[in-house]
Image (tube, rainbow, N blue to C red):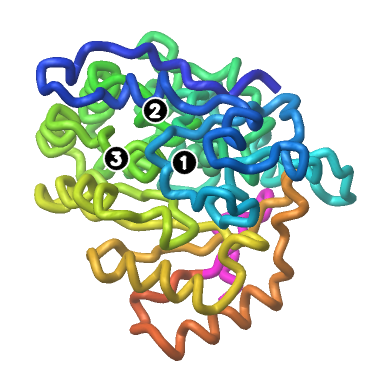
Amino acid sequence: MTSHLSQTKPTTEQASSGRVSWQQELKEAIRSAAELCQFLHIDPAAICAEEVDFPVLVPRAFARRIERGNPTDPLLKQVLATASERDDVDGFVTDPIGEEQAQLAPGILRKYSSRALMITTGGCAVHCRYCFRRHFPYSESPSGLEQWQPSLDAIRADEQIEEVLLSGGDPLVLPDQRLAQLLIALADIPHLKHVRIHTRTPVVIPSRITDSLVDLLKSSRLKVWFVIHANHANELDGEVFASLSRLQNVGIPVLNQAVLLKGVNDDEDTLFELCKRLMDVQILPYYLHQLDSVAGASHFHVPVEEGRALIAQIRKRLPGYAVPRYVQEIAGEQSKTVLA
Ligand code: SF4
């Protein structure tokens, strides 16, 4: 695997506002387990392991939401490399959902009939230790208009595709200028109707939702949907919600997907709080994913029966629309498998 590190170069986009730009926040992110432990006043000898092929990357805005001195904090567990990542466990593999077989062209996956997924970049704003793409060959994926052209040609050639999912990595580590080029090119494909942006960046760097990004998205002829990724209510503070409300205010629906993770959100109250907090700001708790069996993440596994029981419990406490669909991706299947 190549490094999953951000490919974004900081620019001076927000310099005139006097605020630290999102690019600067990304540049100043914590980039090693030792630095993260130091920042949080945690004894590195107790829990940190040297990350081999998937470096630690944690923006400080996210790190500040982690409780200092608490080695079991549920946000910390998501981002800190530990010795368990080296466990070689049967069934945990480098490509757990068969994405390499689903490639239509380099950088585009066609897993479902009316949708295509573009790998827009290999960069992310945070490195989640359970990521199912932590071994994805990002070096072969495009990240600029010229390199996206084969994907755009493949989408244009297939009139069944109505929706494009922008994924990665994380599309929002791309500068607005490059996103604008991509959106214009997509809007020029007549049969496309929707573009769905899958991103964790607004959760970890809320300042990413800039004026220019909002203007860009609202001016597209395509219907834009946002799917964010948060696994625990503590990830969602007022700054995150203020940022996302700027999208909602221009009519962009925001949904959340979470992953069921041992020691992070595998109990009834934690899942309930996550869904409730999302619901209170009109973000739909869309999916709860069963962990994909990716090598290095076996310590996050929760058995499906436990997941089903958790969904049954929160269903008694939430309105139906606020209960996420518990799903699993199975290689080669025509759609996600609904578990509950
Ligand atoms: S889960 Fe998303 S944000 Fe996290 S490392 Fe994977 S692709 Fe990046």
SS assignment at label 1: helix
* C-alpha gap between disc 3 and disc 2: 36 Å
Residue 220 image position (x, y, % from top left): 15, 34
Q: Residue 171 lies in what quarter of the image?
A: top left
Amino acid of disc 3: Pro
User: Is the stretch drawn in magenta largely helix, strand or loop?
Assistant: loop
Q: Earlier in the sequence, mark 1 or mark 3?
A: 1
Q: Where is the C terminus found, in terms of image quarters?
A: bottom right
Residue 77 image position (x, y, % from top left): 62, 50
**Is label 2 in contact with label 1 (beta carbons under 8 Å)?**
no
Q: Residues within 10 Å of mark 2 (few under 14, many from 20)?
A: few
Mark 2 or mark 1, whichever is nearer to me: 1
**Is label 1 in contact with label 3 (beta carbons under 8 Å)?**
no
Q: Where is the N terminus found, in terms of image quarters?
A: top right
Residue at the image position 89 percent from the left and 50 percent from the top:
90
**Is label 3 in contact with label 2 (beta carbons under 8 Å)?**
no
Q: Residues within 10 Å of mark 1 (few under 14, many from 20)?
A: many
The magenta segment is 326-340
Q: Which mark is residue 202?
A: none
Residue 131 image position (x, y, % from top left): 61, 42
Residue at the image position 33 percent from the left and 57 percent from the top:
255
Q: Earlier in the sequence, mark 2 or mark 1?
A: 1
**Which residue, given by chain and number where applicable, does mark 3 sit on?**
206
Q: Is mark 1 within 8 Å of ligand 1?
A: no
Residue at the image position 14 percent from the left and 21 percent from the top:
18
Q: Which mark is residue 157?
A: 2
Mark 3 or mark 2, whichever is nearer to me: 3
Q: Is mark 2 within 8 Å of ligand 1?
A: no
Q: Does residue 202 lie above or below 263 as drawn?
A: above
**Residue 90 appears anywhere in the view:** yes
Q: Which mark is residue 63?
A: 1
